[in-house]
Image (cartoon, rainbow, N blue to C red):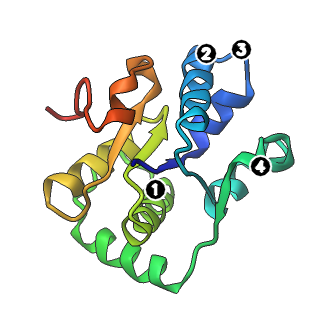
Amino acid sequence: MISILLDTSFLITLADPGRPHHQTAVLYFREALQRACPLYLSSIVASEFQVKQAVTDLPLRNLQVLPFNIDHAMTAGQLMRSLQRDREDDRAAVKDDIKLIGQMVCESITHLLTEDRNLAAKHLARLHDQGLTTARAVLLADGFETDWFEGGQRRLLGD
């Protein structure tokens, strides 16, 4: 069974009907609930979301809050050392994304739901290619696809 970490871009899109991929986010969220896939809300993502909107606006009863702990921190540090980031990448954003990936590695979370092709998904794919994680990103821009819930994928970022 898959498990899913929701990133900030996904939650912003889920909460805002005016965003282009809102319906795709809703479909993924509903499908995950229907299939009883664990949905994780990192405390890091909660703090990022809270900047513009109250985290209590989210369907918290459906999410497992994942605190950032020392194991996550050590794993994130190791991943950051291994990551080749692009010169134009915002260093602070990369550090937060790597913290999320560290949580995914420690907790054996299999998928990241995101709208962010340029940072989170890109770095997750690079770390996957290095054999440092088995997790995959599911991009809202690619549309809704049930194959992710059945152990397959339509297309992999970077393939």
Q: Secondary structure at mark 1?
A: helix
Whole-number angstrom distance, CA of label 3 to CA of label 1: 25 Å
For label 3, count other residues whose C-alpha is less than 10 Å away and answer few (under 14), some (14-19) or many (20+).
few
- The residue under label 2 is 23
Q: CA distance from mark 1 to mark 4?
A: 21 Å
Q: Which residue is mark 4?
A: 60
Q: Is residue 48 left or right of residue 90?
A: right
Image position of 148 (left or right of 11): left
Q: Secondary structure at mark 4?
A: helix
Residue type highlighted by circle 1: Asp
Q: Which one is earlier in the sequence, the residue at label 1 or at label 4?
A: 4
- Determine whether the residue tagged by mark 2 lies in a helix, strand or loop: helix
Which residue is denoted by mark 1 in the rendering? 97
The relative height of residue 141 versus residue 151 in the rendered view (above or below) is: above
Q: Nearer the viewer, residue 159 or 154?
A: 154
Q: Residue at horizontal 51%, vertical 60%?
A: 96
Q: What's under tag 2, amino acid-wise?
A: Gln
Q: Residue at x 55, y 46 (%)?
A: 7
* Of pointers 3 and 1, the one earlier in the residue sequence: 3
The mark lying in front, picked from 3 and 2, is 2
| 13 relative position to 94: left or right | right
Categorize mark 2 by other alpha carbons within 10 Å: few (<14), some (14-19), many (20+): some
N-terminal-most mark, 4 or 3: 3
Q: Nearer the viewer, mark 4 or mark 3?
A: 4
Q: Mark 3 — residue?
A: 18
145, 19: nearer the viewer: 145
- The amino acid marked with disc number 3 is Gly
Residue 111 x %, y %: 40, 46
Q: Earlier in the sequence, mark 3 or mark 2?
A: 3
